[in-house]
Image (tube, rainbow, N blue to C red):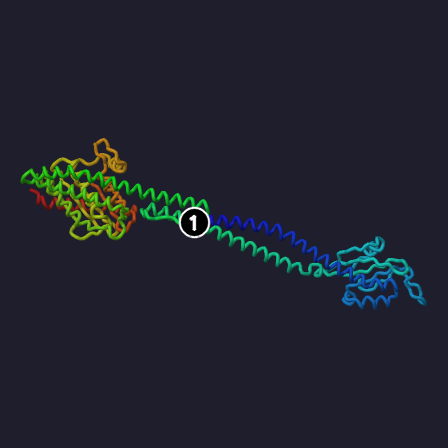
Amino acid sequence: MRWALVKVCLAVTAMVVIAFAVPLGLVIREMASDRAFSDAERQAGTIAPTLSITTDREELTRAVLSTEPGDRGHLAVHVPAPDRSRAGEGAADGPLDIGTRRATPKDVETVRKAGRASISEVTGGFALLQPTALSTGEIAVVEVFVPEGEVSNGVATAWLMLAGVGVALIVGSVAVADRLGVRMVQPAQRLAGAAQDLGEGRLGTRVPEEGPTELRSAAVAFNSMADQVVQLLANERELAADLSHRLRTPLTVLRLNAASLGEGPAAEQTRAAVQQLEHEVDTIIRTAREQRPQTQGGQPGAGCDASEVIRERMGFWSALAEDEGREVRLAGVDRTVRIPVARPELAAALDALLGNVFRHTPEGTAFAVDVHHSGDAVIVLVSDAGPGIDDPKAALARGASGRAGSSGSTGLGLDIVRRVAESTGGDLRIGRSVLGGTEVRIWIGLHGNRPERGRRGHGRRVGRRIGRQRREENRAAAGPPH
């Protein structure tokens, strides 16, 4: 917009300058020409008194040389032939010419007959032919030479001044248009930047109500929209907190019933599950009551140790796996692996995936969790030996939409995992595991960068390498063949 205003103002100002400067330059040239020929007429008139008294050659020669143009050779007198001699001298034939002739005899004769002044173009300039009456009644012609430089004297300087004034006007108009454009563009840029900040989750962003009337109205509307968004989010958090709080009553009843189950592995697992559920409900209530936008995964302070969280959750699920006769494998959690994901979010994602294993595979089905650190990302693989997923794309689509599929699954667990991965710039993929069932691969970016195609291929190579390691471990555990 800024450059558009500058170009429009430049075009308009240039047209105005041309419309006025060109005619004015032509007028200046005409004025210089008129001034030069007016001076020539005045110089021609200085010799007229002498011609009215005498036509003697010597007298006329002295009179011509006494004038400024005559001294420079720019003045000539053409006297007709009849009765031009002084008393006591013989008659002379032909016209009398004093000075340097530049005009043609034909032009001189034409002026003498017409009795009107005329300007003839000659070599190096122009010749002013002025008729003058003699005492004898004849008509003499005074010729004044006007050099071409005198006709255009001062025109170039005047044109340069006009050009300078025109350039100054154009530059000034462009500067004014640029300042006006800045006053219009800056509020628009602030509005665009605020919209981007609001989209990135900085809900406290507001726009100064400055600039033209239209942009001020847009700023007012944006600020009102931002306030409404904050209010809607606050209402949603309040609603989530209220709904979660309502779960405490049935949880209390469930906890009391679980306490009355007595001793035994099943009773302990039930009480542990109820305690975990109460903890999750309390976490939801506290998070909702904070009433502030969640930090992005890549921001400092929002990370956790993935190995520690995975060990903790696998310890929880291993007890249930032991009861169902499931073989559990855990690898890659022997060192600290910091990821830009909050601890509750990673725990919820793992619980969702491991819960799917227990819900959708028969008892006794083995599963494994592997963690691999690739430098710029952390890859978490959750594999099982179950029947697998017939259509992984449909499963991911259910997770994105939240609608139940033909298998009765809502896909909300996969949606939780997908959101955790994408918050770091990673992604979620479903494929066939080396155990024969489903493999869910979570790519967690460490720097907020989305995985490139080459890196995705690297993730598949990691999965194949882990699969080979598992097969080698299985063969080693089976011992030599009989």
Classify residue 54 as left or right of residue 424.
right
Residue where numbered disc 1 is placed: 210
Query: Looking at the image, which is closer to me, 283 or 428?
Result: 283
Classify residue 74 as left or right of residue 191.
right
Examine the rendering and report whether any part of residue 245 can be seen: yes
Q: Percent from the top left, x then y, of residue 418?
A: 25, 42
Q: Residue furthest left?
A: 263
Question: Where does the C terminus fall, quadrant-wise?
Answer: top left
Classify residue 341 as left or right of residue 253.
right
Query: Looking at the image, which is closer to me, 258 or 461?
Result: 258
Classify residue 215 as left or right of residue 310.
right
The number of numbered badges drawn on the structure is 1
Q: Percent from the top left, x then y, of residue 45?
A: 81, 61
Residue 109 picture quarter = bottom right
Residue 48 picture quarter = bottom right
Examine the rendering and report whether any part of residue 456 can be seen: no
Q: Percent from the top left, x then y, of residue 336?
A: 18, 53
Please tell me whether residue 65 is drawn above or below residue 273 in the rendered image.
below
Q: Residue furthest right?
A: 88
Q: Percent from the top left, x then y, of residue 283?
A: 20, 44
Please tell me whether residue 175 is drawn above or below residue 247 in the rendered image.
below
Q: Secondary structure at mark 1?
A: loop
Please tell me whether residue 153 is drawn above or below residue 340 in the rendered image.
below
What amino acid is labelled 1 in the image?
Answer: Glu
Q: Which residue shows up at 29% across the image and 49% down it?
A: 449
Q: Which residue shows up at 24% across the image and 32% down it?
A: 405
Mark 1, other Cα within 10 Å: few <14 / some 14–19 / many ≥20 = some
Query: Looking at the image, which is closer to me, 149 or 304?
Result: 304
